[in-house]
C-alpha cells in the first residue's frame, strides 16, 4: 500500500490503472496547500515543478506523522505547463482561463510533471517533459471551452483527456504525464524503492 498525497482524481485514476492499492493523504483544512505553488521570480519551469513537488512531499510527511498513520511510501506529483520559460499555472477565473488558452492556440507548449516518492528515509524523484501542439482556436471555441468549466483547477487551463482533445494536433512524450502522473517514471521509482508491480 502507498499513500497518494494529491487531491487529483486523475492521479488516483492512473494509480488504479497501475493496479496499486493506495490511500489518499490530503491536506488538513488549516494547511495552505496553494501557497506551496507560488512561483519564485523567473524560476525555470523544471526547477519550479520539482521544488513544488518536494515541498508537497515534505508537507505530506509532516501530515502523516501528525496523524499517527501507519508508515508506507508516500507519492507526490505536480504538473505545470510552460511556453518557453513562462509558467502557465491554474486559471484564477474565466478571463484568466481564456487568456491562457489564447496563448496555447496554434502553438506548441511543454507539460512538465515531477514525481517524488519517499519510503522511510529514502526519497526518489523523476521529471517527465512532454510537448503538446494545439490547433488554432477561435474566440468562440475558447469561450465555449471556458464555459464548460473544464479549464478550472488545471495547469494550462485544459485537460488533455477532456474536451480540449478536440484542439490537440500532436503530442510528443507521456500522455499519462500530461494527465498528471507519468506511469513509466512512477513505476520505475516504485520499483527502485522495492515495490513489486505487475
Image (spheres, helix red, strand yellow):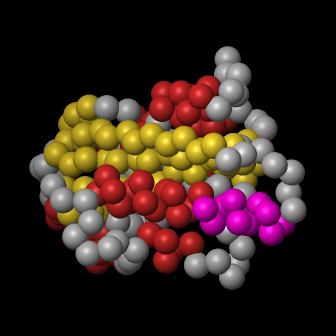
Q: Residue at x 33, y 56 (%)?
A: 47
Q: Is residue 58 left or right of residue 184?
A: right
Which contiguous range is marked in magenta?
58-67
Q: Is residue 135 above or below residue 172?
A: below
Tell which residue pokes out farthest to the bottom in this image: 30
Which residue is more in the foreground, 59 or 31?
59
Q: Is residue 182 above or below residue 197?
A: below
The C terminus: image quadrant: top right
Q: How many marks?
A: 0
Q: Is residue 150 visible?
A: no
Tell which residue pokes out farthest to the front in this image: 121
Q: Residue at x 52, y 51 (%)?
A: 77
Q: Residue at x 32, y 47 (%)?
A: 111
Q: Is residue 8 visible?
A: yes
Would residue 64 be counted in the magenta stretch? Answer: yes
Which residue is more in the foreground, 152 or 16?
16
Q: Is residue 62 left or right of residue 190?
A: right
Measuring from the top left, give residue 98's x and y in whole percent.
26, 69
Measuring from the top left, give residue 100's x and y in whole percent.
24, 65
Measuring from the top left, give residue 195's x and y in whole percent.
70, 28
Q: Quadrant of residue 126?
A: top left
The N terminus: image quadrant: top right
Which residue is more in the foreground, 85 or 162?
85
Would residue 93 be counted in the magenta stretch? Answer: no
Q: Residue at x 59, y 45 (%)?
A: 123
Judged by its main secondary structure, the magenta piece is: helix
Measuring from the top left, give residue 145's x and y in whole percent.
33, 60
Which residue is more in the foreground, 72 or 79?
72
Q: Is residue 15 left or right of residue 78?
A: right
Amino acid at each position: 500500500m502507498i499513500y497518494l498525497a494529491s487531491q487529483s482524481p486523475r492521479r488516483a485514476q492512473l494509480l488504479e490503472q497501475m493496479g496499486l492499492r493506495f490511500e489518499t493523504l490530503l491536506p488538513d483544512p488549516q494547511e495552505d496547500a496553494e501557497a506551496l505553488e507560488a512561483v519564485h521570480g523567473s524560476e525555470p519551469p523544471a526547477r519550479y515543478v520539482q521544488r513544488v513537488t518536494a515541498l508537497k512531499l515534505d508537507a505530506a510527511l509532516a501530515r502523516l506523522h501528525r496523524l499517527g498513520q501507519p508508515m508506507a511510501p508516500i507519492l507526490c506529483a505536480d504538473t505545470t505547463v510552460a511556453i518557453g520559460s513562462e509558467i502557465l499555472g491554474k486559471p484564477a477565473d474565466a478571463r484568466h482561463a481564456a487568456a491562457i488558452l489564447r496563448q496555447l492556440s496554434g502553438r506548441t507548449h511543454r507539460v512538465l510533471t515531477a514525481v517524488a516518492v519517499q519510503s522511510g528515509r529514502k526519497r526518489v524523484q523523476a521529471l517527465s517533459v512532454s510537448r503538446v501542439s494545439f490547433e488554432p482556436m477561435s474566440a468562440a471555441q475558447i469561450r465555449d471551452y471556458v464555459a464548460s468549466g473544464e479549464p478550472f483547477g488545471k495547469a494550462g487551463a485544459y485537460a488533455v483527456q477532456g474536451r480540449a482533445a478536440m484542439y490537440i494536433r500532436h503530442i510528443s512524450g507521456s500522455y499519462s504525464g500530461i494527465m498528471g502522473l507519468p506511469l513509466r517514471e512512477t513505476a520505475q521509482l516504485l520499483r527502485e524503492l522495492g515495490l513489486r508491480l505487475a
